[in-house]
Image (tube, helix red, strand yellow):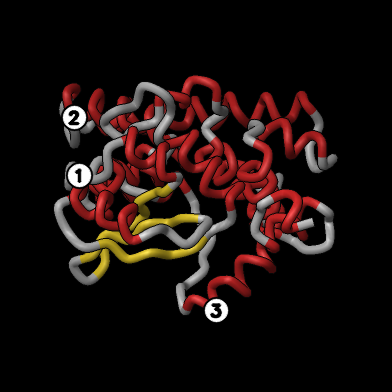
Amino acid sequence: MKERTGQPLGAVLIELGLAKEADVLEVLGAQLRIAVREVDPYAVPDEVLRRLPAEVARRLGVLPIEERGGRLVVATDRLLQRAEIEEIERAVGGPVELTLATRSEVAFALRRRYGHGAADGTDSGSRDTDGAPRLGEHLVAAGALTRTQLEEALQAQRRSYRRLGDIVVELGWLDRTRMEEAAAAARARTRALGAELLERGWVTPEQLDDALRRQAQSNRRLGDLLLERNMLSRETLDDALESLSLQ
């Protein structure tokens, strides 16, 4: 089979249903002595994404996920050629460190964070997403989902590119009406937090607009983005959130 298809043995086994993608990747990582990890595209800061041009990321099938020890950590589902690594290092202007992730996770992350036309490393495909992290965290906080269920749904989303809400409904954890209500509540909470911060004078309209724009691009939580850009302190954010919970 491998000789006829020209595919790596691991890919053939996965296609035949004889091995799971994650299991094959673990073996490859052990052989190459490269770390294997799950990739959460929504947890990658915008400034890390911007270090690697979208065109290079999509063409080589790699995603920068963090900076560590002076190196840019890049996720890939395969062993890159030396010339490919050198191209990435030229593009980012420094050394890179490879980590392995499943093909489905890398493909999902590239689509969500390096959508077509997103040359600056932001997600042009965010218009067709239901804001998975915000919705998922809201469902957990409301007791509608367990943390384990959320992680399972997010893994399914990375494999299928489908909306988180659709996956949760299909799994039978929530009905469609409850899911739509939860999504609306999550959006309302974001708007309420922005209004609370503006009313208290803790952010300017320009700062809030900037954070909301970044949130639409990355689907990260508004509070996390404000903290990351030093627009708020953790104490101030917690105070605002506590005030909203009492309303």
Would you say the residues marked 2 and 3 are in contact, meaning their CB atoms lie under 8 Å apart?
no
Residue 118 located left or right of residue 76: left
Give, as a three-letter code, the residue at label 2. Gln
Q: Which mark is residue 31?
A: 3
In front: label 1 or label 3: 3
Q: Which residue carries the number 2 mark?
A: 207
**Foreground residue among 201 and 31:** 31
Q: Is residue 199 visible?
A: no
Give, as a three-letter code, the residue at label 3. Gln
- The residue lying at 32 percent from left, 66 percent from top is 97
- The residue lying at 40 percent from left, 48 percent from top is 63
Q: Which mark is residue 117?
A: none
Residue 46 located left or right of residue 219: left
Q: Which mark is residue 229?
A: 1
Give, as a three-letter code, the residue at label 1. Arg
- The residue lying at 33 percent from left, 39 percent from top is 56
Task: Determine whether the residue tagged by mark 1 lies in a helix, strand or loop.
Answer: loop
Residue 135 located left or right of residue 192: right
Would you say the residues marked 2 and 1 are in contact, meaning their CB atoms lie under 8 Å apart?
no
Answer with the quarter of the image where residue 28 lies.
bottom right
Q: Is residue 165 visible?
A: yes
**Foreground residue among 113 and 197:** 113
In front: label 2 or label 3: 3
Residues under labels 2 and 3: Cα distance? Answer: 48 Å
Query: Which x, y percent locates residue 88?
Result: 27, 51
Residues under labels 2 and 1: Cα distance? Answer: 10 Å
Task: Determine whether the residue tagged by mark 3 lies in a helix, strand or loop.
Answer: helix
Query: Which x, y percent locates residue 238?
Result: 34, 50
